[in-house]
Amino acid sequence: MRTDQTPDRRELESYHSRVRGSLLGGAIGDALGGPVEFWSLEQIQRECGPDGVRRYVPENVAGSSVYGRITDDTQMTLFTLEGMIRAAVRRDRGIGFTVAAVHHAYDRWLDTQLQNGPDGERDGWLINEQWLYSRRAPGNTCLSALAEPRGGQRKLAQFGVVATNNSKGCGGVMRSAPFGLVPHWVWSSDLQFDSAAEAAGYTHGHSTGQVASGALAVLIGAIMRGHDLPGAIEETQSQLRVRDAGGETYLAIEQATEVARKGPGAEHMESLGGGWVAEEALAMAIYACLVHPEPDQMLDALSLSVTHSGDSDSTGAICGNILGALHGETALPPELAFAVEGRGTILTLADDFIYEFTASDRLHGDYGPDTRWTQRYPGW
């Protein structure tokens, strides 16, 4: 699983900025798109102006205007991160790495959707963050795949097993960026793809829903290794050409690159679909990144990614994940970054992810199996 490449300090500093940029960028895109998710393009342009969504649209919460609220996209991404850290802790304690640890993390996310607050019965720290106990239009596919209501109780899904539905909705891909953020000296691109696809399969049984998630992981992983965006897309397409069931996602990305040659425009964005299914959400986000690829264009890209009649929070989140990885934390629009909900939690979890995947020997190992770190991130 680990390679022999050892990063120098400069590479580690860049890695740190890109991880934080990708995760916070995803949250910003999510929060930009969340309030307008069910608006038509015409309504967005009427309410926000002809240039589309360029600042947080206020939401009425208990009679007050609230700005920058994240949705279930970011919630599930955070639990993906936590599950991946726990999986790595299992590896470093000699228990054995398994992506199913992420499935357990999604079960904890489900608690936040069914309960009013922590009940003290689950371990780890993320489950005790009260602000996460809020339903933000979670996808029915995710809810039903993780648990079935039975007489007031819930029947847990079998951990590590593919969902029995045939959904290829975007609920898998929108949470898959963390798999691409694992350092290249730790995971290969094949492992990034396979792990993201497996985790998406816990809620989405259709192969395209899984493949698109793997494709996003490979795309971000290629960026993290130093590829520019066109180079990262080519590496992703190379993976898809040899993958079973890669055709729909390959064609969607190919269409995005062709449409990008026409330049930016909401009408071009909408020609790629609505983003409700996985390959469309990925393609729409890629299109926005391609037409606004520079660091000082990040707000333009994020705005374009959410200014359409479809699943704006998911396309915005994926766009933010990609460009945050490409340009790093300092490229994020500060007027949006400082105000996004949960920024402290997001960046704390990002830093913990970095610590585990770059310095695990300093966190556990000689210090024994029962450390403050392993209490923070138990094996499941």
Image (cartoon, rainbow, N blue to C red):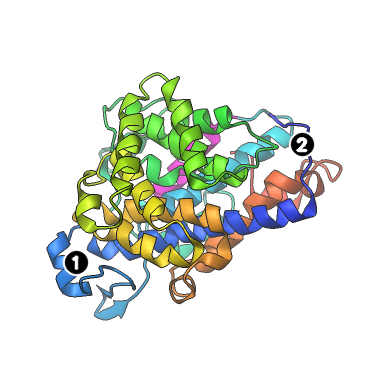
Q: Which residues are magenta?
A: 98-111
Mark 1: secondary structure: helix
Which numbered circle lies on residue 137?
none
Residue at 44% x, 63% y is 298
Q: Can you tell which quarter of the image residue 68 is in?
A: bottom left
Horizontal arrangement in the rendering, residue 284 relative to residue 358 (left or right): left
Crowd band around label 2 with a 10 angstrom C-alpha radius: few (<14), some (14–19), many (20+): few
Q: Is residue 143 left or right of residue 231?
A: left
Q: Which mark is residue 44?
A: 1
Q: Position of residue 87 (x, y in %)?
A: 61, 37
Residue 34: percent from the left, percent from the top? 30, 61
Task: Inspect the image, locate mark 1, and give the three-letter code of the amino acid beneath it.
Answer: Ile
Quadrant of the rendering where the N terminus is positioned: top right
Quarter of the picture containing the C terminus is: top right
Task: State whether residue 363 is above or below residue 215.
Answer: below
Residue 312 forms part of the magenta stretch: no
> How far, Cα to Cα, is label 2 from label 1?
48 Å
Decide if residue 112 is in sight here: no
The residue at the point 49 percent across, 74 percent down is 334
For label 2, the residue is 5
Which residue is at 54% across, 32% downward?
99
The x and y percentages for residue 194 are 51, 28
Point out the residue furthest to the right here.
366
